[in-house]
Amino acid sequence: MQIPYMEILQQEYPEIMGAFKGIVTPSTALAKKPSHAIFQYLISRFHLEPRDSVFIDDQEMNIMAAQE
């Protein structure tokens, strides 16, 4: 059984989670980092300009993939 971690985060930290316009998870994007598909989904879904966006991650390989 998968833990609904996003639900837990939203319940435990509503002030932080409410600051975001939207959230993308591997299950919503049908892809996972560092696949470029998840970044393209995010850009398309929220009509983002990559140069005007901030990506935060704790894994260097994901940061490198996001920069490409």
Image (tube, rainbow, N blue to C red):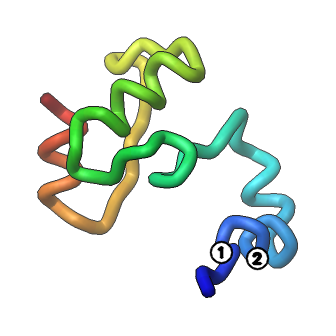
Q: Amino acid at mark 2?
A: Ile
Is residue 45 or residue 58 the one in the foreground? 45
Question: What kind of element bears circle 2?
Answer: helix
Residue 3 sits in which quadrant? bottom right
- In the displayed structure image, the side of residue 4 where residue 43 appears, left or right: left
- In the displayed structure image, the side of residue 10 where residue 46 appears, left or right: left
The vertical placement of 59 against 50, above or below, is below
Count of all numbered marks drawn on residues in the image: 2
Residue assigned mark 2: 8
Residue 47 sits in which quadrant? top right
Residue that extends furthest to the bottom in the rendered view of this protein: 1
Residue at figure coordinates x 16%, y 42% from the top left: 65
Query: Residue 11 in the image: x percent, y percent?
Result: 86, 72
Using the numbered discs, state the Cα–Cα distance from disc 1 to disc 2 in whole angstroms.
5 Å
Residue at figure coordinates x 18%, y 33% from the top left: 67
Question: What kind of element bears circle 1?
Answer: helix
Which disc, if any, is residue 5? 1
Q: Amino acid at mark 1?
A: Tyr
The vertical placement of 46 against 62, above or below, is above
Residue at figure coordinates x 48%, y 40% from the top left: 29
